[in-house]
């Protein structure tokens, strides 16, 4: 079956760096997304990786290793507004998006 | 309209009643989706439509039906609501010409079935 694993919850300190991991087992691979979802709101797009390596976008970076079925989202200089859930999702061979359950990130002052 | 709208924002419904959740997008995306999101379970796909006139079943389709008469609208109907259908429902759309199935979400409908 298809499966995406990510930690349920993480806690970090304002100003610090946090890495949220995602491992996946899917039938085929056509890209990996990270979405951010604030409580009570809709998910919004953060990043997309289809080739191995690191994609940097401001304070956020996303890494992909297709051979290991592994990705991480790196958040630098954490701000209180980064408190949210972070969803990992993989596009499979049928172009269906398979979602992880999400990682709730708690930022403490 | 800009993006995807959903109505109603929230609803409390008696068990056994029929309910239609509305979703409209103005981005001319060919594909649309309905998800439910429950605590600890993440997003689960209910039904999808790859193009107007076609629909398909997702992971949790039982008790729900959809139609796609045109590109913009994708209503979700609960024929006879049950308490286990209490959830937050998100509609999403994607354009096959963009990143592989990048999906754009509506604001959600919070449904409570008593």
Image: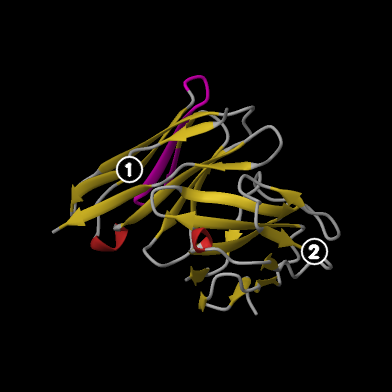
Name the residue that disc number 1 marks: A8
Element on which disc 1 rests: loop
Residue at far left of view: A109
Q: Nearer the viewer, residue B9 or A36?
A: B9
Q: Where the N terminus of chain A falls, by quadrant?
A: top right
Element on which disc 2 rests: loop
Residue drawn 43% across and 44% down? A101
Query: Where in the figure is residue A15, as x and y percent of width and height?
Result: 19, 53
**Above or below: residue A23 compared with residue B10:** above
Residue at far front of view: B16
Q: Where the C terminus of chain A falls, by quadrant?
A: bottom left
Marks 2, 1 in one chain: no
Name the residue that disc number 2 marks: B68
- Could you tell me which chain the residue with mark 1 belongs to? A
Region in magenta: A55-68
Asked if the stretch drawn in magenta spans residue A94, the answer is no
Quarter residue B24 falls in: bottom right
- Could you tell me which chain the residue with mark 2 belongs to? B
Asked if the stretch drawn in magenta spans residue A59, the answer is yes
**Above or below: residue A85 compared with residue A42:** above
Query: Where in the figure is residue A43, as x and y percent of width and height?
Result: 48, 59
Q: Is disc 2 surrounded by few (<14), some (14 to 19) or many (20+) residues within 10 Å?
A: some
Quarter residue A90 falls in: top right
Q: Is disc 1 surrounded by few (<14), some (14 to 19) or many (20+) residues within 10 Å?
A: some
As measured in the structure, the alpha-carbon distance from the residue carrying label 2 to the one carrying label 1 is 35 Å
Query: Where in the figure is residue A66, as x and y percent of width and height?
Result: 52, 25
Query: Where in the figure is residue B83, as x and y percent of width and height?
Result: 50, 63
Residue drawn 45% across and 55% down? B38
């Amino acid at each position: 079956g298809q499966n995406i694993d990510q930690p349920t919850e993480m806690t970090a300190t304002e100003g610090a760096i946090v890495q949220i991991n995602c491992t996946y087992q899917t039938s085929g691979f056509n890209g990996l997304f990270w979405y951010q979802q604030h409580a009570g709101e809709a998910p919004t797009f953060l990043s997309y990786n289809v080739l191995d390596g690191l994609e940097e976008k401001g304070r956020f970076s996303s890494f992909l290793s297709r051979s290991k079925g592994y990705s991480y989202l790196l958040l630098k200089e954490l701000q209180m507004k980064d408190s949210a859930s972070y969803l990992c999702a993989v596009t499979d061979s049928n172009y269906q998006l398979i979602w992880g359950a999400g990682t709730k990130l708690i930022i403490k002052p | 309209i800009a993006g995807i709208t959903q109505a109603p924002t929230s609803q409390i419904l008696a068990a056994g009643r029929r309910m239609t959740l509305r979703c409209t997008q103005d981005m001319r995306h060919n594909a649309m989706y309905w998800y439910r999101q429950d605590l600890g379970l993440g997003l689960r796909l209910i039904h999808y439509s790859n193009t107007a006139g076609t629909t398909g079943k997702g992971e949790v389709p039982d008790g729900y039906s959809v139609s796609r008469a045109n590109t913009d609208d994708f209503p979700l109907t609960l024929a006879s609501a049950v308490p286990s259908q209490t959830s937050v429902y998100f509609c999403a759309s994607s354009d096959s010409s963009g990143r592989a199935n990048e999906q754009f979400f509506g604001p959600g409908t919070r449904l409570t079935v008593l």
